[in-house]
């Protein structure tokens, strides 16, 4: 029996999470993509705490007009800005089981432009 799209993504996500782990020196940037919005968090897995988060539903991002890819880039830049203020430079990227293209890639590129290294 074939896997559904959601089950396939969750299987890939579990496989990625075996490898990618966030520490206090190098936290994990995780991405969740819905049909309309995109969310990103920087997480320290040692303490199970979210350090910084950004999403496309924030007022300053929601008010800007553009395509979903342009908005994902803005979310990445906003997240990087907050992370740099919190003293985070290096991160590990967790694509959450999504393919690395489109909105996920745009978010990663925006985070790199904002000053994060991964």
Image (cartoon, rainbow, N blue to C red):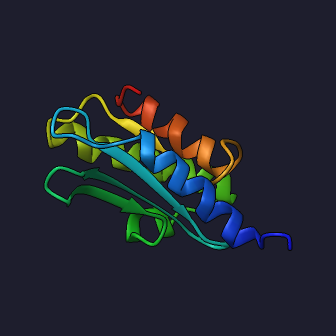
Q: Quadrant of residue 37?
A: bottom right
- Rendered location of residue 28, percent (x, y): 34, 44
Which residue corresponds to the image point at 70% horizontal and 63% vertical from the top-left? 8
Please, which residue is most extreme toward the right here?
1
- Rendered location of residue 80, percent (x, y): 34, 41
Which residue corresponds to the image point at 43% horizontal and 46% vertical from the top-left? 18
Does residue 87 sit above or below 34 in this rendering? above
**Quadrant of image for the C terminus:** top left
Q: Quadrant of residue 114?
A: top left
Would you say 50 lies left or right of 62 here?
left
Which residue corresponds to the image point at 41% horizontal and 41% vertical from the top-left? 20
Q: Is residue 106 visible?
A: yes
Please, which residue is most extreme toward the front here?
1
Would you say 66 lies left or right of 51 here?
right
**Quadrant of image for the N terminus:** bottom right
- Rendered location of residue 79, percent (x, y): 35, 49
Which residue corresponds to the image point at 85% horizontal and 70% vertical from the top-left? 2
Does residue 116 sit above or below 70 in this rendering? above
């Amino acid at each position: 029996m074939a896997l559904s799209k959601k089950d396939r993504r969750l299987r890939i996500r579990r496989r990625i999470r075996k490898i990618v782990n966030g520490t206090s020196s190098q936290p994990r940037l995780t991405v969740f993509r819905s049909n309309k919005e995109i969310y990103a968090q920087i997480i320290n897995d040692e303490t199970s705490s979210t350090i910084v988060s950004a999403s496309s539903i924030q007022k300053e991002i929601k008010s800007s007009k553009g395509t979903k890819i342009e908005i994902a880039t803005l979310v990445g830049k906003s997240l990087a800005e907050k992370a740099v203020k919190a003293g985070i430079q290096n991160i590990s990227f967790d694509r959450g089981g999504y393919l690395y293209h489109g909105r996920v890639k745009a978010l990663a590129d925006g985070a790199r432009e904002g000053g994060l290294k991964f």
